[in-house]
């Protein structure tokens, strides 16, 4: 089933015409309403009239997470707060989150793109969808939720965690679609086996998995263990949330909802657009958003675009699975974590030295974040009780900042290796 055939199967010229019209409107709006954008365009010697079609997109300046941080919390919004009906947030590079705002129309567009994504995945109104993405400031839960309702499927808004309950409802309610991070899906599969639940008693047939990178091997494992078709869904809060793109039943790249989000691939070093089909950093321009339209937003995700015909009949451009990021952001159990967030916690405390090493492991399919921290000479003690109290304090502070639990290990002064060049702060041992 194709949700919006006219758009999803439009010809290339038709799509470009839609994109051009919407880009011109967006540029007018941001120039006149957002001082940061006006200043950026003036610095590039541009006025809105210079943007005549989508082919002029490359002339516009980039937007980054730093712009959102500098305008924290609402400075990049294009409409008055009275028109904003919801906010979401994701972690930024410092303690401050990246905040996004949605108008009523933005929420409608979001539902539409998630509904399209669900249709691509083969979900229909007869399905019972267990939404096990987190609800709250994270966009995963509510994003999937409204898309499912719009489609007419039955939603179980269980949110993330509470694995025993997830299994109970899955069995009792006859869940046919599970939406969560791929790592949680694997964890669920093990919990199902441990609980002795028979696969025949489950009705799972589709999984809507995203919010973190995962490989084809992981897909095969999940499909085998849960007995479902594992579909990759992509998105980021800054652009809208889940539903920016999604795989169809052919699982050969994620169709981008490009009548709302225009993709480009750039070289992250030179910032020059790369020729069609080359791998580089993904950049998006939103062309329908009212709350916080973003122009040439650097996602830092590395991928390539696929323009070949897809068997499903959709003509929208596809993006390959993301292979990594051009910055140091880690995704731990679906939560975005920057090493700098941990560093700023340690710098705030007098007992710790700003020397630390983060290691990430995957145990039982769950991400584990370990932080090794050096204690300042004068606070180092032979008393276990004192050190344990300090360890708990650091653990709590990092938990408050990141919103996830971490294992803190204290070490003696000068134990963590020093390097003359770039410090190696992160060792990621997950085999993704
Ligand atoms: O993770 C939105 C989302 C929710 C997507 C539920 C899919 C499902 P953020 O928290 O802002 O938003 O994180 C965005 O997560 O830039 C990617 O690095 C990563 N990411 C999201 N989806 C995928 C995916 C949500 N399918 C950041 N594959 C993005 C790889 C993904 N990475």
Image: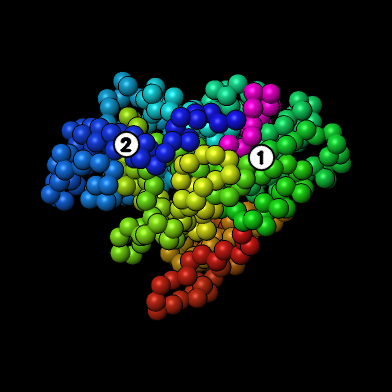
Quadrant for the N terminus, please: top right
Image position of 222 with respect to 31: above or below:
below
| Left or right: where 115 falls relative to 70 | right
Quadrant for the C terminus, please: bottom right
For disc 2, the neighbor class at 10 Å (few under 14, some 14 to 19, many from 20) is some
| Left or right: where 365 falls relative to 372 | right
Q: Position of residue 359 (x, y in %)?
A: 57, 63
Mark 1 falls on what kind of element? strand
CB at disc 1 and ligand 1 closer than 8 Å: no
Image position of 42 with respect to 259: above or below:
below
The residue positioned 57% from the left and 63% from the top of the image is: 428
Q: Position of residue 20 (x, y in %)?
A: 29, 38
| Left or right: where 121 falls relative to 266 | right
The residue positioned 58% from the left and 44% from the top of the image is: 311
The residue positioned 61% from the left and 64% from the top of the image is: 429
> Of tags 1 and 2, which is closer to the observer?
2
Query: Distance of mark 1 from mark 2, alpha carbons?
Result: 34 Å
| Left or right: where 317 falls relative to 83 | right
**Does the magenta segment cover residue 405?**
no
* Mark sitting on residue 17: 2
Q: Please give the range of residues in magenta.
A: 120-131
Q: Position of residue 165 (x, y in %)?
A: 73, 32
The residue positioned 55% from the left and 31% from the top of the image is: 2
Mark 2 falls on what kind of element? helix
Find residue 173 and report its image quarter: top right
Mark closer to the chain start, 1 or 2: 2
CB at disc 2 and ligand 1 closer than 8 Å: no
* Mark sitting on residue 207: 1
For disc 1, the neighbor class at 10 Å (few under 14, some 14 to 19, many from 20) is many
Q: Position of residue 105 (x, y in %)?
A: 38, 23
The reply to whether residue 290 is in sight is: yes
């Amino acid at each position: 089933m194709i949700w919006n055939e006219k758009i999803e199967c439009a010809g290339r010229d038709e799509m470009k015409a839609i994109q051009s019209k919407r880009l011109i409107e967006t540029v007018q709006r941001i120039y006149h309403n957002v001082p940061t954008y006006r200043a950026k365009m003036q610095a590039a010697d541009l006025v809105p009239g210079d943007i005549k079609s989508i082919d002029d997109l490359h002339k516009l300046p980039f937007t980054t997470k730093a712009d959102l941080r500098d305008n924290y919390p609402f400075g990049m919004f294009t409409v008055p707060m009275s028109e904003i009906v919801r906010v979401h947030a994701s972690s930024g590079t410092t303690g401050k989150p990246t905040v996004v705002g949605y108008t009523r129309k933005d929420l409608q567009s979001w539902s539409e793109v998630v509904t399209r994504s669900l249709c691509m995945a083969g979900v229909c109104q007869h399905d019972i969808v267990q939404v096990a993405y987190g609800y709250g400031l994270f966009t995963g839960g509510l994003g999937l939720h409204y898309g499912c309702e719009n489609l007419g499927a039955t939603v179980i808004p269980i949110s993330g965690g509470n694995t025993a309950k997830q299994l109970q409802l899955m069995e009792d309610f006859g869940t046919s679609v599970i939406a969560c991070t791929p790592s949680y899906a694997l964890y669920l599969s093990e919990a199902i086996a441990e609980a002795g639940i028979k696969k025949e008693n489950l009705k799972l047939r589709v999984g809507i998995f995203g919010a973190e990178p995962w490989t084809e091997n992981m897909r095969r494992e999940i499909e085998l263990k849960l007995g479902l078709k594992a579909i990759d869904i992509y998105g980021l809060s800054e652009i809208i949330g889940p539903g920016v793109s999604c795989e169809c039943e052919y699982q050969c790249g994620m169709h981008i909802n490009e009548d709302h989000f225009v993709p480009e691939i750039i070289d992250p070093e030179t910032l020059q657009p790369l020729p069609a089909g080359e791998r580089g950093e993904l950049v998006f321009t939103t062309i329908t958003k009212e709350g916080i339209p973003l122009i040439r937003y650097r996602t830092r995700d590395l991928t390539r675009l696929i323009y070949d015909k897809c068997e499903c009949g959709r003509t929208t451009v596809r993006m390959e699975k993301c292979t990594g990021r051009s910055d140091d952001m880690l995704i731990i159990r679906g939560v975005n974590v920057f090493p700098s967030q941990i560093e700023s916690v340690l710098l705030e405390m007098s007992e710790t030295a700003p020397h630390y090493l983060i290691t990430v492991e995957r145990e039982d399919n769950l991400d584990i974040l370990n932080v090794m921290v050096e204690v300042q000479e004068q606070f180092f003690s032979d008393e276990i009780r004192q050190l344990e109290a300090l360890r708990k304090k650091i653990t709590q502070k990092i938990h408050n900042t990141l919103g996830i639990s971490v294992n803190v290990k204290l070490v003696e002064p000068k134990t963590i290796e020093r390097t003359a060049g770039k410090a190696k702060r992160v060792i990621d041992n997950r085999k993704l």
